Amino acid sequence: MRILVITPWYPTIAAPIAGVFVRRDAELVASSHELELVHLVDPALLTPADVAADAASPYPVHRVPMSRSRPGDLVSAWRRIRDLSRGFDVVHTQAFQALLPFQGHRMRMPWVHSEHWSGIGDSNSLTARGRLVLRLTGRLLRRPDVVTAVSSHLLSAVAKFRSGPTMIVPSVVPDVSPAPADRDPDVLRLVAVGHLVDGKDPVLAVRTVQELRRRGVPTTLEWVGDGPLRGQIEELIAGDDGFTLRGTLDSAGVSAALSRADMFLLPTRGETLCLSAIEAISHGRPAVLGALGGQRDYVTDQNGRLVEVRTPNAYADAVLDVRSRLNRLDPDSVAATIRGRFSAHAVLQGYNGAYEQAMSMHGKSLL
């Protein structure tokens, strides 16, 4: 079957980790189907080096410049999509912004849309302008034949905009072999993976570590990721070698950081799924997270804690509760709580089910 994936989120040379989960999903689908990908790319991120790098892709990648601030770009993007989609069996859009070029145009072929955008899951996280745009464009979610979402939290938000078929298809998380941390019984080592932005609340993470120390628990924090709050965090932790800001790391670097830690801490304000927490649990590291979002689908007392109250005291209490159970929460038992749920096999089955349903709605067959 021929699948045309259309997404605004995909890695570039300038932003190498942007949309890595979309690329992972595309590579998975391409392992069983003939696939091409259209990247609706911010013109500021596109360079000739990207075109050269795309030559090594396992499937054709078409970079289509699209700035949402220039209406003419939406028109030209639609024309490119219309021309490229001829001869494909299914169009598969990924993330809400991929729907924008379709406004005012009719799609006559089977269409699956996969939603990842946190703005759908929590509109309060948007600016006033963003909420207005969502109110005006949210109806675009009615257009695809089938819509998938990465979590039940996001799926319930999608259902507010459409009554057609929906299903949960999570993102792929690579399998790892969980290994015990080289634990120092006198020090609690925490790790966080996420951008240094308000939504991840690194300030609260720092305050939580400071509260744990105030209670007499020697604690360190290694943060993987970068962002606009880096300067503020550097001021908060100045002169304290118990905090480490690693910046952006590749997948091997992230895996190594997770393996070094006793526990994952991310006081996030909200998540559609939180792949970094799933990766931590897959590594056998229990996770302490904010309670709002798709993490409710998989965080349990057997692999971590969700925290409702956004204070250092509440997070410190949760960390100490999990710490008291660390000897019972051995890495393999922690990883076993989600084993198979985010595997390549499970995700591909989900996408194939969505493709089959969309095609049947057009009187076609997946076979």
Image (cartoon, grey):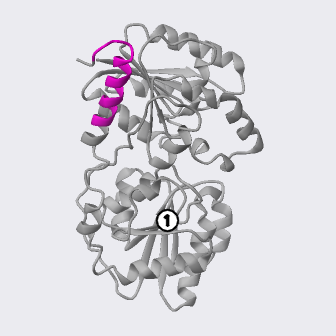
**Along the horizontal axis of the image, is 90 left or right of 94?**
left
For badge 1, the amino acid type reads Leu
Q: Residue at x 44, y 43 (%)?
A: 150
Nearer to me, 325 or 17: 325
- The image position of residue 332, as x and y in percent, is 23, 67
> Would you call the spot at circle 1 few (<14 residues within 10 Å), some (14-19), or many (20 or more)?
many
**Along the horizontal axis of the image, is 349 left or right of 21?**
left
Q: Which residue is mark 1?
A: 289
- The image position of residue 178, as x and y in percent, is 25, 63
**What is the span of residues highlighted in magenta in the rendered image?**
349-365
Secondary structure mostly seen in magenta is helix
Q: Residue at x 68, y 65 (%)?
A: 232
Q: Residue furthest right?
A: 128
Q: Residue at x 34, y 48 (%)?
A: 173
Q: Residue at x 52, y 54 (%)?
A: 293
Q: Is residue 363 magenta?
A: yes
**Along the horizontal axis of the image, is 362 left or right of 212?**
left
Question: Can residue 264 be seen in the rendering of this structure?
Answer: yes
Above or below 274: residue 85? above
